[in-house]
Structure formats: structure tokens, C-alpha cells
Image (cartoon, rainbow, N blue to C red):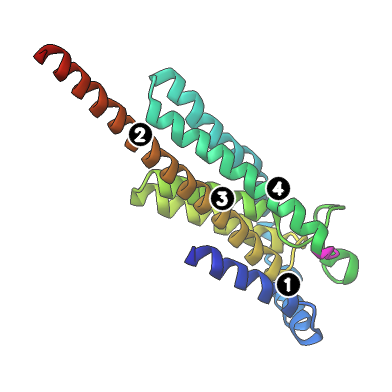
Amino acid sequence: MGFIYKSCLLYTFLIFSFQSHQAQNADIQLLRKINVQRNTRLDASMQLISNTEAYIGIGLPVSVVIASYIKHDKILFQQGVNMCLALGASSVSTFILKRIVNRTRPGYTYPDIVAFENERSYSFPSGHTSNAFCTATSLSLHFKKWYVVIPSFLWAGTVGYSRMHLGVHYPSDVLAGAVTGAAGAWLSYKIQQQWLKRMQKKKKIVNKGSSQRLFLSTTF
């Protein structure tokens, strides 16, 4: 609950702060340093990294589910389904927030921003970043190994940076997207863990009852 509370506070701060002139000015100035003053030799690489959001962000959860079927692994199946549900929750949250805030893309507001994509949807929060951090967080929660956690978040962070390099998102959009994705994955994981604990508790009660009935039947 503390994580959700902090996430809500951060959302409130971001939504209201960027609407002020001073905060908006700081946001666009940082974006100009990233986009206008960018290393143009990285343009193609940033576009490629940005596009991996769809292939990796969606492909990994689906791949985990497919792998669970191949291996007949119930636990792996539960993990894959949870990752898919987390991604769905993150996508829905991002969709709703975009329409609540209605923030115009920086390329439409500031002519000096070089936008590599003609995005028509609203800017806040970044959907690419949200999906990337959702997948990275889900992987880190389900597969708690350093060689999973570190590459996952490095990839997600690079996706977020690429959205600013490509001029389609403000820094605050990317930050909000990261929070949205991570919060969606964390909440989905916690709900699943609570549900599994309840199922195990019910199973123990049923097994205990069956054992008692068997004992009584054999005794008498």
C-alpha cells in the first residue's frame, strides 16, 4: 500500500507541477538538451531501441506463457499470465491518463523540437516507457536474478531515453510512464501472490479435512 500511495503522490505532483510555467520551462529545456543538441549518429539506434518496446515488451510475457505450455510448468504459466495481466493494466492506465491530462506532444508545441514520429495521441504519460518498465518490473519480480534485473531495467531506461531523443515525449512524460508501468507490474504481482496464498490455505484446509475423515473411517 505504501508503494501505491507514493505513486499516487508522484502522479499528483507531476500532473500539477508541469502545468506551471516554471516547471514547463524546465521540462522543455531538458528536452532541448536531449533532442535538439543530440548526437545525430545515434538517431537510427534510438529508433531501433524505441521499436523494441513492442517486440520485447509484449513478446516476453507471451513467450513465458508459451514456454510454460511446452514445459508443462504450472508456476511458469502463472508467472506468464501475471506478466500479461500487468501489461494490460499498465496499458489501460496509460490510455486513461493520456485522456485525463490531454497534453500535446512537444513537437507540435515547440517548432525547434525534431520529432521523428508523427504521433497523434496525447503525450502524458509515455506509453512506450510504461510498457517497457512494466515488463522489466514483472521480470524482476518473478525471476529475481541479477542477470535478469539489471539488463531489464537498462533496456527499459534506454527505451525511455529514446522517446526524448526522438522528440516525442517530455522528460516528465517518461518519468510518469516509468511509474505507471512499474506500479502496474508491482500491483499485479502482489494481487497474484495474495490470491495464491489464499488458494494454498484453502487447499490445506481441504486436505486436513480429508485426512481427518479418512482417519475416522479407518478407526471405526
Q: Position of residue 80 (x, y in %)?
A: 49, 34
Instruction: Reply above or below: 196 against 185.
Output: above
According to the image, label 4 marks what residue? 92
What distance separates the C-alpha of mark 4 from that of mark 1?
A: 18 Å
Mark 1 residue type: Ile
What distance separates the C-alpha of mark 2 from that of mark 1?
A: 43 Å
According to the image, label 3 marks what residue? 134
How crowded pointer 1 is (Cα within 10 Å; few <14, some 14-19, many 20+) is rated as: some
How crowded pointer 3 is (Cα within 10 Å; few <14, some 14-19, many 20+) is rated as: many
Region in magenta: 101-105
Q: Is residue 47 left or right of residue 146?
A: right
Q: Position of residue 63 (x, y in %)?
A: 52, 30
What distance separates the C-alpha of mark 3 from that of mark 4?
A: 12 Å
What distance separates the C-alpha of mark 4 from that of mark 2?
A: 32 Å
Element under disc 3 = helix
Q: Earlier in the sequence, mark 2 or mark 3?
A: 3
Element under disc 4 = helix
Q: Is residue 192 left or right of residue 97?
A: left
Instruction: Reply above or below: 1 against 131.
Output: below
Q: Earlier in the sequence, mark 1 or mark 3?
A: 1
Pointer 4 with pointer 2, Cβ within 8 A: no
What distance separates the C-alpha of mark 1 from that of mark 3?
A: 20 Å
Q: Position of residue 213 (x, y in %)?
A: 22, 19
Does any portion of residue 12 appear in the rendered image?
Answer: yes
Q: Residue furthest left?
A: 219
> Which mark, by number, is residue 114?
none
What distance separates the C-alpha of mark 2 from that of mark 3?
A: 31 Å
According to the image, label 1 marks what residue? 15
212 or 125: which is nearer to us? Answer: 212
Q: Residue, x 50% and y 64% (percent of image)?
A: 3
Instruction: Reply above or below: 20 against 1.
Output: below
Q: Nearer the viewer, mark 4 or mark 2?
A: 2
